[in-house]
Image (cartoon, coloured by chain):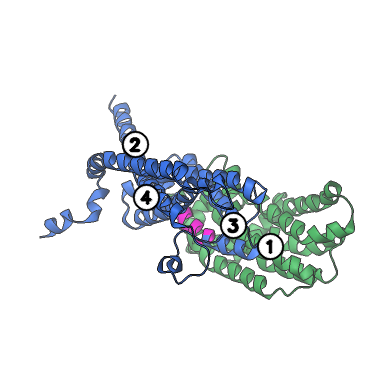
Chain colours: A green, B blue
Amino acid sequence: MIALLLRDLKLAIRAGGGFGLGLAFFLIVTILVPFSVGPQSALLATIAPGVLWLGALLACLLSLDRLLALDWEDGSLDLLATAPLPLEGVVSIKALAHWITTGLPLVLAAPVLGVLLSLPGQGYVWLVISLLLGTPALSVIGTFGAALTVGLKRGGLLLSLLVLPLYVPTLIYGAEVARRGAIGMEVETPLLMLAGITAATVALLPFASAAVLRVNLR
Amino acid sequence: MTIAAKANSVWEYANPKKFLATSERVLPFFWVTSALCVGIGLIWGFFFTPDDYKQGSTVKIIYLHVPSALMAINCWLMMLATSLIWLIRRHHVSALAARAAAPVGIVMTLIALATGAIWGQPMWGTWWAWDPRLTSFLILFLFYLGYVALWQAIDDPDTAADLTSILCLVGSVFAILSRYAVNFWNQGLHQGASVMRAGAITGTDTEEKVSNVFFYPLLFCIIGFVLLFIALVLYRTGTEIRARRMRALLARERVGG
């Protein structure tokens, strides 16, 4: 399992694109927002949590079609399926690798970009916590979408369409935690819901992803 | 003994031939009764009920809005059930029925959204609001779109049936999750459940309920839409079975020739 994780991480770093793509996209979105809505810091502070969450979600979405497609093309997915490691474990590791290469950099970059969007001081902690809790769910759900569309030639658009409604609850609770944190309200309810979604998806969705992948590899 | 038990089983309709024969026999009944019910309900509702004291004649959109919204949700439930049957018992008719129902569900969702917008404009002063119920329906619409797109994208029918079934299961969980998330996110303009409510029927409820004047024609419309949905799904499933048979025949001809 660790070997597979290390392999995926190495591939993501050395092949280029995978590692920086999501981060660059996140950067572009948040830098362009003030140009489109205006530089008033009060307005920016209001929308900052939502913009940061949306940027992180879209950045995750952007890198999903590379998640399994490359392994599918060169046949290593077939090898992984016949390996002693169960397919559920493979997809979990794939999701973890995706999170480390996409989600974690986003979490680390978010506070810096929060400064650019004049996020209120008390909001940083909750922004980072909500992203830290929420992005694993995005990766796991995305892996399910990638497994569904892995056999398709141009699955990118379909992947986005399938994953979009699945992302809605995570986005709602995640952005709500960040928003409430920024204006100093109590965050317990959405935070618990967000944690619940992440825990449930991490625990259960790999089974669905593996089942789907088995059908696609048949 | 076992044969007699089998003959009475509901699973014998999983045989495409038996399904086609039975559905052809009952289809005219469903077409006629659904046309009658919807016709009676709409004519009664449009011409023989008074205008609402607050909403005027716009209240009559209810006769299309409520039944279509109801069927949009029930259609997904039916797809969930048939998907489960396909995954567990591998009956092809079941998978094809789910496939046949999805476009009907899309149309029902669209009707509900469109009539809702037309109703919302004079009542709330806006075509669209990010109200929980409206938002949930938009999300449901996205689920339907993704489901149908996945069916369209995959060539092998069994693979497509498997993948869409699992998507339907996962999607159902997330649809319910979205419903509660959206409720949490915004308190809405839309009125609560006011047609079918246990409290409203037994009279223990003090909240508003649709008046009987509007309720009886609405009941006709709802029954009519249910029958119409059954008729459409049976008809479309029959078409799917025949299309698949035709493909098999063509493939056999190619191999033979």
Read off the magenta span. Answer: B166-175
Residue A57 falls within the magenta-colored stretch: no
Q: Report whether A175 appears left or right of B93.
A: right
Tell me the tag on residue B223: 4
- Is disc 4 in the same subunit as disc 2? yes
User: Mark 3 sits on what residue?
Assistant: B190
Q: Distance between the residues labelled 4 and 3?
A: 23 Å
User: Mark 2 sits on what residue?
Assistant: B239
Mark 3: amino acid: His
Query: Which residue of the protein is positioned furthest toward the top in this rendering?
Result: B257
Mark 1: amino acid: Ile
Residue drawn at x 87%, y 60% as measured from the top left: A42
Magenta highlight: main SS? helix
Secondary structure of the residue carrying tag 4 is: helix
Q: Is residue A36 above or below residue A50?
A: above
CB atoms at circles 4 and 2 under 8 Å apart? no
Residue A86, x across and y down, in percent: 48, 63
